[in-house]
Image (spheres, rainbow, N blue to C red):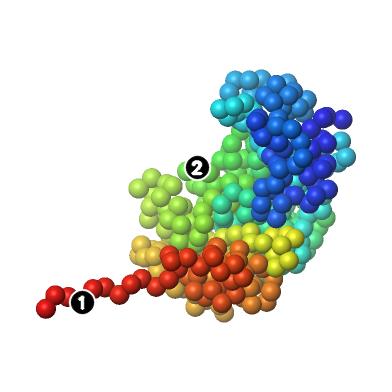
């Protein structure tokens, strides 16, 4: 048993989402969004490096020695599965272990909006799940793949960095391929997948122009493509897709988005009302003719108004979702207030009134013009 497994076991027993190990501080756990140190001495450089080296392959050790970060999955002695990032910083090495639940969650257990279930009925097009790091994008995608796996007879090819949730083939054949282990890049993975009779292709991250271009081609040629971007709203997602490709491809990209993009699901993780867990809150944009026209005419700044009035299509803004969840006593009102854009909607629910700062007050009236 690797010595690092003791920290991982402690973290999973506490129900944390991440275990952080870094030189100069004790091990820390991410519990319901907060970083909490465990009762242990500050880790020393040689000590922590020896812990990490115990779980690396020779190729990984050589790669890390050449100054590169590492991303890989790890299974501890007691069967716990983790997504790992190992890095160097000014005081020495560091590592972050993301705990991956043994069971793939369902969309119902995540309490995600019903429209996400309906989106899984499509046979072609692109669905993007976006949000900043650590907002549950991989978990939502895993739940979507699980729904397909239980309900349809498809060939699903999942390209990941690294493999997180492990899917056992049920109704579907689910093929999981890992960046750096099975494929050299996401773009090459999509290119190969299109020769493997896929119905659904999951792209772990649309991180460069080649990957975006290949994913668009796959969606246009009769496949359902699921992907992620590190964007924090529907507007930023559309703009990022357009700006990622060369200027001469701009019109083609806008045409693709208006015709083949099915939806953008953007996530936040907000503390539950009892503070014992976190829940995904979603902004959702579903493609309509009106939204397609705004994209084609470079009026993406008007997309929020479409989301705000698109409830019948399953659309919602973050503020609408936060307000509804607070009213239903599903999330912590103070945490919701911190994430809200239009904070006055949530002021009456806030329990920590010190959060309501002068910044949230209406601006002073302008001075009267001189006589």
Nearer to us in this view, 84 or 333 = 333
The vertical placement of 60 against 362, above or below, is: above
Compared across the picture, whether 36 is left or right of 359 comes to right
Circle 1 sits in a helix, a strand or a loop, which is it? Answer: loop
Q: Which mark is residue 235?
A: none
Of 199 and 103, the residue lying toward us: 103
> Which numbered mark, 2 or 1, is in the foreground of this view?
1
> Is label 2 in a helix, a strand or a loop?
loop
The structure residue drawn at horizontal position 59% and vertical position 71%, both measured from the top left corner, is: 350
Which residue is painted at 76% across and 27% down in the image?
Answer: 51
Mark 2: give few (<14), some (14-19) or many (20+) Cα within 10 Å: few
Q: Quadrant of residue 83?
A: top right
In the figure, residue 253 lies in which quadrant? bottom left
Q: Could you tell me how far apart the alpha carbons at marks 2 and 1 are, in whole angstroms?
A: 52 Å
Residue occupied by mark 1: 368
- What quarter of the picture does the C terminus occupy? bottom left
55 left or right of 297 in image: right
Q: Is residue 76 left or right of residue 205?
A: right
Residue 291: tell me if it is visible: no
Res. 228 visible in picture = yes
Q: Residue at coordinates 68% horizontally, 57% vertically from top-left?
A: 140
Q: Say whether residue 14 is left or right of residue 210.
A: right
Query: Which class describes the residues within 10 Å of circle 1: few (<14), some (14-19), or many (20+)?
Result: few
Residue 132 image position (x, y, % from top left): 56, 52
Compare marks 2 and 1 and give the one earlier in the sequence.
2
Q: Which residue is mark 2?
A: 208
- Quarter of the figure that contains the N terminus: top right
* Horizontal and vertical percent position of residue 343: 50, 70
Q: Residue drawn 69% across and 60% down?
A: 278
């Amino acid at each position: 048993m690797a010595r690092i497994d003791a920290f991982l076991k402690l973290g999973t027993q506490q129900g944390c989402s991440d275990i952080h190990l870094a030189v100069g501080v004790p091990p820390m756990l991410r519990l319901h969004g907060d970083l909490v140190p465990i009762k242990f001495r500050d880790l020393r450089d040689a000590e922590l490096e020896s812990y990490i080296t115990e779980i690396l392959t020779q190729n990984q050790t050589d790669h890390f020695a050449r100054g590169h970060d590492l991303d890989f999955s790890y299974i501890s002695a007691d069967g716990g599965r983790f997504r790992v990032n190992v890095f160097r910083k000014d005081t020495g090495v560091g590592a972050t272990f993301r705990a991956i639940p043994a069971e793939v969650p369902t969309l119902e257990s995540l309490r995600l909006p019903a429209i996400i279930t309906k989106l899984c009925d499509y046979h072609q097009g692109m669905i993007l799940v976006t949000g900043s790091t650590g907002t549950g994008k991989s978990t939502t995608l895993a739940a979507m793949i699980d729904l397909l796996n239980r309900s349809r007879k498809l060939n699903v090819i999942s390209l990941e960095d690294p493999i997180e949730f492990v899917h056992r083939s049920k109704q579907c054949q689910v093929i999981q391929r890992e960046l750096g282990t099975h494929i050299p890049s996401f773009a090459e993975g999509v290119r190969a997948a299109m020769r493997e009779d896929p119905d659904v292709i999951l792209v772990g991250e649309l991180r460069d122009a080649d990957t975006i271009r290949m994913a668009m081609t796959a969606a246009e040629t009769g496949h359902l493509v699921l992907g992620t971007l590190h964007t924090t709203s529907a507007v930023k997602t559309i703009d990022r897709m357009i700006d990622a490709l060369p200027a001469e491809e701009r019109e083609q990209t806008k045409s693709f988005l208006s015709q083949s993009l099915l939806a953008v699901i953007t996530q936040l993780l907000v503390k539950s009302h009892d503070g014992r867990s976190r829940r995904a809150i979603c902004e959702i944009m579903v493609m309509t003719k009106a939204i397609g026209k705004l994209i084609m005419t470079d009026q993406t700044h008007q997309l929020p108004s479409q989301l705000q009035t698109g409830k019948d299509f399953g659309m919602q803004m973050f503020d609408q979702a936060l307000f509804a969840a607070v009213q239903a006593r599903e999330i912590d009102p103070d945490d919701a207030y911190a994430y809200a854009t239009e904070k006055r909607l949530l002021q009456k629910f806030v329990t920590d009134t010190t959060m309501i700062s002068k910044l949230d007050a209406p601006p002073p009236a302008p001075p009267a013009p001189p006589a």
